[in-house]
Amino acid sequence: MTDTSDAILARMMALHPKVIDLTLDRVWRLLEAVGNPQNRLPPVIHIAGTNGKGSTQAMIRAGLEAGGARVHAYTSPHLARFHERIRLAGDLITEDALTHVLDRCYAANGPDPITYFEITTVAGLLAMAETPADFTLLEVGLGGRLDATNVIPKPALTIITPVDLDHQQFLGDTLPEIAGEKAGIIKRGVPCIVGPQQEVAMEIIEAQAARLGAPLLAYGQHWHVGEERGRLVYQDDHGLLDLPLPVLPGPHQIMNAGAAIAALRALGQGEAAYEGAVTQATWPARMQRLRKGDLANLAPQAELWLDGGHNPAAGKAIAATLDTLPKRPTHLICGMLNTKDIAGYLRPLSAHAPRLTAVSIPGEAATLSAQDTADHARRAGFQATTAASVTEAIAQVIEQTPSARILVCGSLYLAGHVLRLNDGAPETT
């Protein structure tokens, strides 16, 4: 009997004791063993940054597909199923294809140490190299310079979305250090789209681009984007575009859309692509409204929203999005990892949602306990309680305020748990 992809992935977890161990040596070894698929990909757009990578990738993909292209996409982490990480020519990888490519990589690697992300990234590259398509969208997992995706010798384009403090234990304690890691995806002579940056981060990115002779197309210098009279207005040296606002909710998506349009312009795409980028993109767990499903049915009079952002910039973006929504009593259900800046994330949100129910994230060793999250929330200005599960938390909220706006937030891992629950999976604690 052939193993399922879940069984193979579980075996892969045991190949290296550390979940994260940033170096490219093991990746290069395995790529060589499976025939160097990184050299056989359709033109690659490589995307790094702290915030907005996934949304920007989703808009670029929607734009390219609206223009008639077949697009591979690689992203992480997944929310409900691993298959979400690998999209082949527009479609999520099938179970048979995923099992086959994981088996090949596991066999080629043998007993040698390699992290889960490294071996699964090689599997994704192998699957994409063997499937015809027109473009490959490759999202960095962590950092950039030593990320397992940073193995493409000559991408068509690189993109750096806004850089902020996150993953300091791996990338450095300061913004210049983190920006240096993100700028590690810049390649000699390859154009780089740069989203809005703090000045110290921009200086690092510009210096790296100058060293490598990589043309920069930077927000505020080479392209501009904003909202005017309910429309998205984009302008660069090629002219002005007047487009609908992005379907992905939140004011921050205007900047992400600008980076996506700048990328589509650099790739020679036309009007259909620009329109498609803003009107057809989908990206789960980024201010996603859950209208149907088991959890949504628990609170028929309420609005149920989901967001996986987890750092201070994400907290500000969520707060700005809540500010644009019609006024309604708003309650957070929050679970976070103990590696995050909890206070920095929560502080911007307290003015928009004074009440918070804290939960632990099921199955995550690094989860902050519900009690600790509640303690942090109180210090950030919330009225905070705890619940044993997301289901219990929703029940507590609607018992007091049946028509509340409920936002489940704080972690992509919690978001994945919520999507599985909403699709009918049993609750675990």
Image (cartoon, helix red, strand yellow):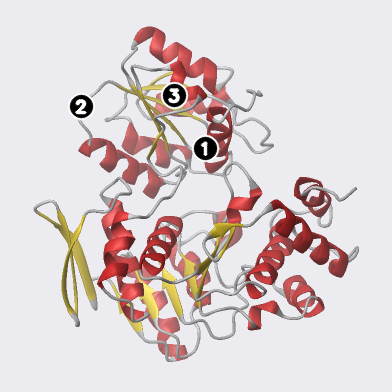
Q: Is residue 86 above or below residue 3?
A: below
The numbered mark at residue 423 is none
Q: Residue furthest front?
A: 68
The numbered mark at residue 296 is 3
C-beta proximity under 8 Å, tags 3 and 1: no
The type of residue carrying mark 3 is Ala
| Residue 386 in view | no
| Residue 17 in view | yes
- Side of 147 relative to 271 (left or right): right
C-alpha span from label 3 to label 1: 14 Å
Q: Residue placed at 27% from the left, 20% from the top?
A: 329
Q: Nearer the viewer, mark 3 or mark 1?
A: 3
90 or 336: which is nearer to us?
Answer: 90
Residue named by callout 2: 327
Residue 127 pos. (x, y %): 67, 68
Q: Earlier in the sequence, mark 3 or mark 1?
A: 3
C-alpha span from label 2 to label 3: 20 Å
User: Which image quarter is the C terminus in?
Assistant: top right
Residue 23 pos. (x, y %): 69, 70
Residue named by callout 1: 415
Q: Earlier in the sequence, mark 2 or mark 3?
A: 3
Q: Residue placed at 55% from the left, 69% from the top?
A: 144
Q: Residue placed at 42% from the left, 84% from the top?
A: 209
